[in-house]
Image: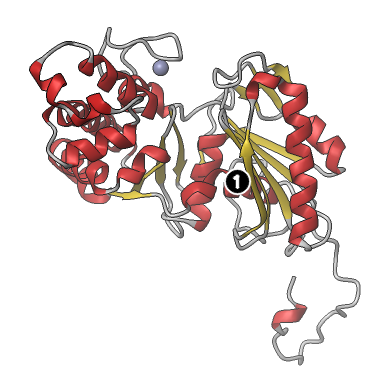
Amino acid sequence: MTTDGSLAPADGGTAAGTPVLGLDIGGTKLAVAVVTADGAVHGLRVRPTRREEGPDAVVRRLFAMGHEAVAEAGLGPVGAVGIACGGPLDASSGVLQSPPHLPGWDDVPVGPLAAAEFGVPFALENDATAAAVAEHRYGAGRGLGSLVYLTISTGVGGGVVLDGRLHRGAAGNGGELGHITVRRGGRACSCGRAGCVEAYASGSSIAARAAEALADGSPEAARSPLAALPAVTAADVSAAAAAGDPLAARVWDETVDLLGGAVADLVNVLEPELVVLGGGVTRSGAMLLDPVRALVAREAMPPAARAATVRLAALGDVVCVVGAGAIALDVLPAAPAPARTPARPPHDPAPTEAARV
Ligand SMILES: [Zn+2]
């Protein structure tokens, strides 16, 4: 983002053409790539986080992956480094504040560490927020003014772009769309409250609810093909529901119903042009998208429902690393004035593409 929070075009007023480094710190995997102003990734590396090794070791490996990506990309030095990570975090100081998916990462100054390691400015943003920027600039929301992005993965996160500007909130952690209450007093959530949409629609919750249903001793549980699996995943539940298993269908229907209710609320409150659903659980495709779309069309206020399209994310598994690059592109130092381009006399033809900066 620019300093005022607006989403500048990727080459607007910056060192156009300078690549940046994107670092995505997930609970299970690290993803690193050099990102160019067109949103393309180069030298992509994805490796397990191994978070149990603690922040020092993980950050060291993350930075080593960064150097590898820069070398493999072969695009020269990077001009900035962007870091996407689950919050809470302080974006301006670059400090991670004990994110729940990284136990023991208490006040880790990952931004300043990255700036020192690579010798360039840093940008730090919540991973779902960075993903929202990436989808707005390079993905499903390209060219639109307003977008709500929801990532449905191990947890549920989000980001909001309104009137072309990223909504960051007063303390920089706005857009925690996973913690909308969909069932007051419901299942315990990782945030400490109960009944959040994350506590129902996240991949881990879908798997946990299926495991609980399988353990209830009902005839339905005994007949479910899921009972034969050593461990049930959200993808297993989606596939079994699609194949007609009543137990899996019950878990899946509850998932999409509560998720769809949250999306309808967001559509009513924000009236966006587009709602983008991303994250691992959306690999179930139409099983997730169709019922959420139908619920929004049925339950959201008619003008808002008509204005909003609900779509799957376009950038796939690299969305967070592209988002990390996008926020880094926004902190690139301003391009130096072009020394070799003389002032254009009035009678000169329009400048050529190469002469523009
Ligand atoms: Zn919560």
> Which residue occupies 43% across, 27% down?
155
> Which residue occupies 72% across, 84% down?
351
Q: How is the image coloured?
A: secondary structure
Q: Is mark 1 within 8 Å of ligand 1?
A: no
Where residue 294 sits: x, y (%)? 16, 43
From the image, which quarter does the C terminus lie in? bottom right
Q: Answer whether residue 301 is visible to the viewer in this image.
A: no
Quarter of the image where one finds residue 101: top right
Where residue 33 sits: x, y (%)? 67, 50
The front one of 205 and 325 is 205
Quarter of the image where one finds residue 41: bottom right
Q: Which residue, as the protein is rendered here, is positioned at the far right?
A: 339
Where residue 175 sits: x, y (%)? 46, 30
- Give the number of marks: 1
Q: Is residue 173 above or below residue 100?
A: below
Q: Which residue is mark 1?
A: 321
Q: Is residue 263 left or right of residue 48?
A: left
The front one of 119 and 65 is 65
From the image, which quarter does the N terminus lie in? top right
Secondary element under disc 1, as helix, strand or loop, is helix
Q: Tag 1: residue type? A: Val
The front one of 141 and 70 is 70
Quarter of the image where one finds residue 235: top left
Q: Answer whether residue 160 is visible to the viewer in this image.
A: yes
Q: Is residue 80 left or right of residue 246?
A: right
Q: Is residue 163 above or below residue 347?
A: above
> Which residue occupies 36% across, 10% down?
188
Quarter holding ligand 1: top left
Q: Is residue 345 above or below residue 202?
A: below
Q: Is residue 324 left or right of residue 335?
A: left
Dot 1 surroundings within 10 Å: few (below 14), some, or many (20 or more)? Answer: many
